[in-house]
Amino acid sequence: MVRRSQKRKLQKVTGLCRPEVGLRVKRSCASCGPEPGGEEKKGRGNPISIQLFPPELVEHIISFLPVRDVVSLGQTCHYFHEVCDSEGVWKRICHRLSPRLREQGSGVQPWKRAAILNYTKGLYFQAFGGRRRCLSKSVAPVLAHGYRRFLPTKDHIFILDYMGTIFFLKNALVSSTLGQKRACCYVVLCHGAKDFASDPRGDTIYRKYLYVLATREQPGVVDTAHSQSCDCVEVYLQSSGQRVFKITFHRAMSFKQMVLVGLESQRTLLLLTEEGKIYSLVVNEAQLDQPHSYTGQLTLRKVSHDLPHLCVACMASNQGSTLYITDQGRVYFEVHTPGVYRDLFGTLEAFDPTYQQMPLPVSLPAKVLFCALGYNHLGLVDEFGRIFMQGSNRYGQLGTGDKMDRGEPTQVRYLQRPVALWCGLNHSLVLSQRSDFSKELLGCGCGARGRLPGWPRGSASFVKLHIKVPLYASSLCPTRECLYVLSGHDIEHHPAYRDLPASRVAGTPKPSLGAEAAQDPEGVAAQACEPYLGQIHSCPTLQECMETTKVIVGWMPLMATQEDFFWETLDMLQRAFGGVGQGPPTPDS
């Protein structure tokens, strides 16, 4: 009865179908050919092509579908691909997802990008030490236009969207009845922001201030038609969101990124200009909250002064070192303390305390796309998706399968094409994508205090963590208490990896004589499997050995086809020896 009533309403509104005629609508696409079984049948009437409908009506109907269904429908034929890819459809979808968003900037498909950014945005977290393996979702600011970056502090979380608005999630770490933590409310901190930063140490207890790089209209301009804007740095208290400091630069200087180096008394702001030059500004945080004017001097950094031909594309920092990546994919390193220099390079022969800002080149065989910088180790990802680790390996945080330090970039051969890479105090995390486009989180190093969920004793090689990762996860940031995962997909900005040429499959940095044995791939692979073999040897029966092996196969970073092959093989062996195959383990097993 429901179907008949819906059919009568459709006939009354459109007038395209009548009960006595019995017309039906078919898909007609010249590129796809005739519809299978499209010949006329008795009692079915003449088919009507969907192309006879007005394009506005088709776009209006498609705009009510979920975003995933619109993308899937656009892959069926050439006609639906053009309709589902039109800006009219995505504009309606964007207005449905974000009713307050009415204008978009430049771009090839601005409305499609805006709709996907708002559909995939999300911030997830999981408290370390808990029993739950699924990430909890925090409060999503309705006004946010996607999530570009986020930064957890001691008490709150700050989110930067793609419109330059920073959202202040107050009381983000409030315990609930389930033992988890959720964000309670949010407010808008400021507009026109380009970037933000805080204390570079991994512990959020040191993040007292939030530094914001923003663009502001110059005050005192009479002619509003030709108003001029200037870049500035504003400092806010993370506890209350109150602004305590502001410094404005000349309108001729335009910056795009900012990082912090050093401790509170000698905090150094590194500012990257649009032309690829680095400027530095020293700030004493002990004087920021005092009611008097503060004067600072902006100077050109040594890497831009001594190497003026370099154009820096991005940079990363911690409390004792800075890493620069140029537009050509070359890497330069600044080390400010002898201890970090010894951990990173294994020696103090070339360290000069009088020239701590001297940039040191890091040799790699290919162009570097992005990096991650920890306290005494670092990770680099090149254009072919290869991961190179360097530095201290006391806890196995390099993921090489052993605990030997590396003074040169060493490739982690069993991991490729990561989505995100993160290096902390003594552990590392990799967000990777499987062949079925699902995401998984791998980790290595120290596992104390739940840093590596499922691996409390840690691991010297990258292992699959017991966390269900969101489908659109793009970045991560662990703290002492929680693991935060940012979700979002930008169709215009994503790592475009290249296929490795056959002649460069074995192309890795030439190791030294002392590190040549440690970089042997067979030895590294064997050492990486030692924890798994120890668990299998401890099984008392053959049945338990089979079950343990199946679980370990699910932990290892393998492709989906490889996992299915091993699981089917183990099931066959269990049936052959009289056991009962249980199939592949579930994520919660």
Image (spheres, rainbow, N blue to C red):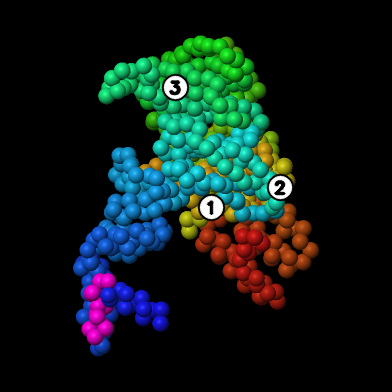
Seen at 30% across and 74% down, the residue is 10
Disc on the earlier residue, 3 or 2: 2
What secondary structure is found at the residue carrying circle 1? loop
- The image shows residue 359 at horizontal and vertical percentages of 50, 20
Question: What is the C-alpha distance between the residues marked 3 and 2?
Answer: 41 Å
Which residue position is annotated with label 2?
A: 129
Residue 470: image tag: 1
| Residue 304 pos. (x, y %) | 43, 18
Q: Badge 2: few (under 14), some or many (20 or more) residues near its Cα, within 10 Å?
A: some
- The amino acid on which the numbered mark 2 sits, given as a three-letter code, is Gly
At which x and y percent is residue 391? 61, 32
Q: Residue at x 37, y 58 (%)?
A: 71
- The quadrant in which residue 275 appears is top left
Secondary-structure class at tag 3: strand
Q: Which residue is mark 3?
A: 232
Q: Amino acid at mark 1?
A: Pro
Residue 362 in percent (x, y) is at: 50, 28
Mark 2–mark 1 Cα distance, whole angstroms, equals 20 Å
Magenta span contains residue 31: no
- Kindly indicate whether the residue at mark 3 contacts the one at mark 1 (C-beta within 8 angstroms): no
Q: CA distance from mark 1 to mark 3?
A: 36 Å
Whether the residues at callouts 2 and 1 have beta carbons within 8 Å, the answer is no
